[in-house]
Image (spheres, coloured by chain):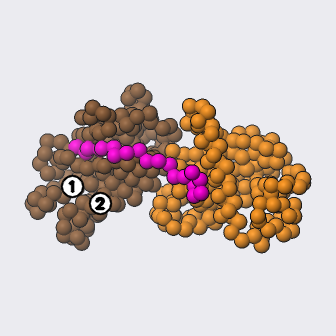
Chain colours: A brown, B orange
């Protein structure tokens, strides 16, 4: 099953995606983070803003994803994890993070990114290392926003980041609950 | 012949309405239940909406708030039918269309809760492909990717005329007019 997601992801990346210059992307993101750091001066606030920006992006990104991939509903959270990593990340960033550490009840998983196009050639200042800046926190927001639009409330956060000197970059995604569909007013 | 089209968001609101041949009468019979989706040239057709003799150009002239009420009615129908079909069969996308003697209603729903409804005359074949194309090629391109267009995530009023995206109405119009069954009966 993962094979077919991988081929789907590769296929979409090859044919249906307009590509842009990777350096332009990295530099633009870097300048956004730099500006946020300058404006807020508090790294927890910067993390929050990045996550919020990511959330807004995610709510729209999911429509683009569904339109391009045409996939149906995932049967369980494990399948969601595979879909996100093999098709989603591949389609938008051309990377396929590995899905690891799936919890026993299947409600949590980790995404291990071995390369991060947002953080190419980036070095964090010492203050950022002390104060826990998660440079690519926008990705967590994107995951939260897009999954919320398909009725899953999740919590996504960074566990480790190579920019901070850790061995690998890992995002942990926890399913909080499945959201109920909204009922029109006046109906029970 | 395509009569009109609605788009509903995941908050059960009608966020877009477009009509082409709404004033057209498929069968000019008096409908005691005031079927809002068929001809509006029957005067005094119940349903609580005051119908005056309407013109073809703007059938809803003189009817206040009727788009909102009508939207709620259509949404209710579609919502109930979809749940019914889902309960009767295991398939997620079971409900795709229904047909009455006056019109046929085609339905397409995305995983994000966006619902597309098109009404056409009863003889039209499936418009699933067309609805899907409206979603992928017009809605996603012009509304989702446009940062100024309200894609309904912002709570509050969404303009059902344009959805905040200038090209959307034209895009949809052009696309639907290009369908072969647009003005054939």
- Residue B129 lies, in percent from the top left, at 64, 41
Q: Residue furthest front?
A: A188
Residue that numbered label 1 is attached to = A134
Question: Residue at 76% across / 64% down in the picture?
Answer: B48
- Residue A133 lies, in percent from the top left, at 18, 58
Question: Residue at 57% across / 55% down in the picture?
Answer: A184
Q: Is residue B105 visible?
A: yes
Quarter of the view holding residue B23: bottom right
Is A143 included in the stretch rendered in magenta? no
Question: Residue at 72% across / 71% down in the picture?
Answer: B64
Query: Of helix, strand and loop, which one carries label 1?
Result: loop
Query: Of helix, strand and loop, which one carries label 2?
Result: helix
Tell me whether the residue at label 1 lies in contact with that at label 2, contact meaning CB atoms closer than 8 angstroms: yes
- Residue B154 lies, in percent from the top left, at 47, 64
User: Which range is magenta?
Assistant: A170-188
Circle 2 residues within 10 Å: few <14, some 14–19, many ≥20:
many
- Residue B66 lies, in percent from the top left, at 71, 66
| Image position of B2 with respect to A39: above or below | above
Q: Is residue B21 visible?
A: no
Q: Chain of mark 2?
A: A
Residue that numbered label 2 is attached to = A50
Q: Which residue is nearer to you in this view: A166 or B82?
A: B82
Decide if residue A117 is on the left or right side of residue B152: left
Q: Chain of mark 1?
A: A
Q: Earlier in the sequence, mark 1 or mark 2?
A: 2
């Amino acid at each position: 099953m993962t094979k077919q997601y991988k081929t789907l992801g590769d296929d979409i990346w090859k044919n249906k995606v307009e590509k842009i210059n990777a350096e332009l992307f990295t530099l633009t993101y870097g300048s956004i983070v730099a500006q946020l750091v300058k404006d807020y001066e508090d790294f927890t606030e910067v993390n929050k803003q990045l996550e919020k920006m990511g959330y807004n992006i995610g709510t729209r990104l999911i429509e683009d994803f569904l339109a391009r991939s045409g996939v149906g509903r995932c049967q369980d959270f494990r399948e969601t994890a595979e879909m996100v990593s093999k098709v989603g990340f591949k389609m938008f960033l051309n990377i396929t993070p590995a899905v690891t550490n799936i919890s026993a009840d299947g409600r949590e998983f980790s995404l291990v990114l071995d390369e991060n196009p947002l953080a190419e050639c980036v070095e964090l200042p010492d203050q950022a290392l002390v104060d826990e800046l998660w440079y690519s926190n926008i990705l967590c927001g994107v995951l939260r926003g897009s999954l919320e639009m398909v009725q899953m409330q999740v919590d996504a956060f960074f566990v480790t980041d190579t920019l901070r000197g850790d061995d690998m970059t890992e995002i942990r995604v926890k399913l909080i609950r499945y959201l109920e569909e909204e009922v029109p007013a006046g109906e029970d | 012949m395509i009569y009109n089209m609605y788009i509903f968001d995941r908050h059960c609101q009608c966020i877009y309405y477009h009509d082409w041949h709404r004033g057209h009468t498929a069968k000019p019979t008096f409908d005691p239940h005031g079927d809002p989706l068929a001809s509006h040239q029957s005067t005094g057709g119940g349903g609580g909406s005051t119908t005056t003799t309407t013109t073809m150009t703007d059938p809803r002239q003189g009817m206040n708030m009727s788009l909102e009420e009508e939207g709620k009615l259509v949404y209710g129908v579609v919502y109930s039918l979809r749940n019914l079909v889902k309960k009767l069969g295991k398939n997620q996308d079971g409900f795709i269309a229904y047909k009455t003697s006056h019109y046929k209603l085609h339905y397409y729903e995305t995983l994000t809760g966006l619902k597309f409804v098109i009404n056409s005359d009863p003889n039209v074949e499936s418009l699933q492909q067309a609805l899907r194309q409206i979603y992928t090629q017009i809605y996603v391109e012009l509304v989702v990717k446009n940062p100024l267009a309200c894609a309904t995530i912002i709570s509050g009023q969404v303009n059902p005329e344009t959805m905040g995206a200038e090209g959307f109405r034209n895009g949809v119009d052009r696309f639907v007019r290009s369908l072969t069954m647009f003005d054939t009966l």
